[in-house]
Image (spheres, rainbow, N blue to C red):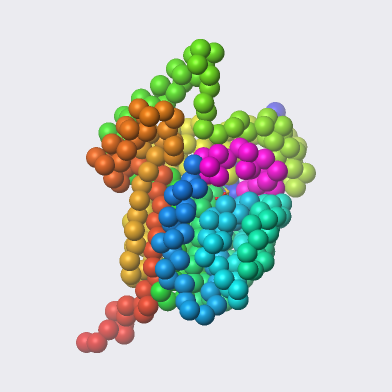
Amino acid sequence: MATLPPTRPAPEVVVRINRIWHDVEAEHYDRVHHEIITDEAEHWRKLAAKAAVCLPQGPATVVDIGTGTGFAMASFWPYLRPGDTAVCLDISVPMLGKAAARLESLGGPIPPICAACDASGIPLPSGRAHVVLMNSVLHHMPEPEKVLAEVCRLLAPGGMFVLAHEPNARARTSPHAVALYLAYRAWRKLRRLAKSLYGHKGQAAEVPKDLYEEVIRRLREQKVITKDQQVDWRWISQAVDFHSPTAGGAFLRQGGFDPSALIEQQSDAYEASSIETYAHLGKIRPSGWLLGLLDRLLGRLFPRSGASFSLVARKAEAIAGTKEDAPA
Ligand SMILES: C[S@@+](CC[C@H](N)C(=O)[O-])C[C@H]1O[C@@H](n2cnc3c(N)ncnc32)[C@H](O)[C@@H]1O
């Protein structure tokens, strides 16, 4: 009888599944992910402007981790000058190909440097980066703490870390947010049922079915799963979006990140940070003025409970002393 692989794959397996998934998805990414490419564009223009204030007079280095097709680096592109270095890192080579094409099509003073690597071990010297960008990447990481330690190591003192489009753990622990989110999902399901009446305005295009088939074929070919093991789209989705509470169509209480805790875990490395939560109804840009209004109202009432969050944090100029070297 066919066996199922373990429900939570080991970290190195999660990285391999992510690479296979994104290799296959690269061709479709911009068309499928409207919730990033279109809906996050304005937000990222603001995040880029906030981060750009730390750029030095001399040449700057900007690193985009999990570049994908280049969305975050493209948002930062207007701030780059001749002599600067733009480094795009991703585990997927086809994604990097798309990013290089996008950034080259924007023109500008410098060509991007694209390199394939796992974000938990970045081949760049410590203190090299003035800005590190990450959009919709951390929840794919089996060991996010390793990636955050890498970010901290890479950043020069005073450098900026921008992290966005990540699931907010708090959105699933506050009762009002859970109730509203479930009500909204129920309403969306009803709306889908009635779509023949007034048309479906889904946020993202459907993931092509044959994409899953191709991913399963590669998982077998690359021996991530055996020929006998059966996996479905849910298993793949939960492995790819490892820390997402809604991966595989689930609604899990665990999953997501507490943005304040992410910064605090880096023991005094950051001296200032601004955190924003958004998508209080689960969508970045709810359709229709009424839902837009409700989303803004909820944002005012419950500023920490949006389904997604972004943060901009500045690395401290000097790391505070440890207990051992503090004066007696
Ligand atoms: C959802 S996409 C986000 C892409 C892009 N930042 C954007 O905003 O559109 C996640 C990206 O992270 C990359 N990725 C996943 N796991 C990775 C890892 N362990 N190391 C480096 N990149 C990884 C994927 O290949 C993919 O391009």
- Frontmost residue, 15 versus 310: 310
Residue 246 percent location from the top left of the image: 47, 36
State the residue at coordinates (47%, 52%).
44
Residue extending furthest toward the bottom: 327
State the residue at coordinates (61%, 54%).
70
Determine if residue 15 is in view. Answer: no
Magenta span contains residue 19: yes
Magenta span contains residue 290: no
Quadrant position of residue 117: bottom right
Quadrant position of residue 318: bottom left
Determine if residue 311 is in view. Answer: yes
Residue 93 percent location from the top left of the image: 71, 55
> Number of numbered discs present?
0
State the residue at coordinates (52%, 65%).
79
Vertical arrangement, residue 296 with respect to residue 185, above or below? below
State the residue at coordinates (41%, 44%).
308
Image quarter where the N terminus lies is top right
Vertical arrangement, residue 127 with respect to residue 312, above or below? below
Residue 3 percent location from the top left of the image: 66, 33
What range is drawn magenta here? 15-38
Q: Is residue 213 left or right of residue 159?
A: right
Magenta stretch, main secondary structure, is: helix
Residue 203 percent location from the top left of the image: 51, 32
Vertical arrangement, residue 275 with respect to residue 291, above or below? below
Image quarter where the C terminus lies is bottom left
Q: Is residue 106 left or right of residue 320?
A: right
Residue extending furthest toward the right: 221
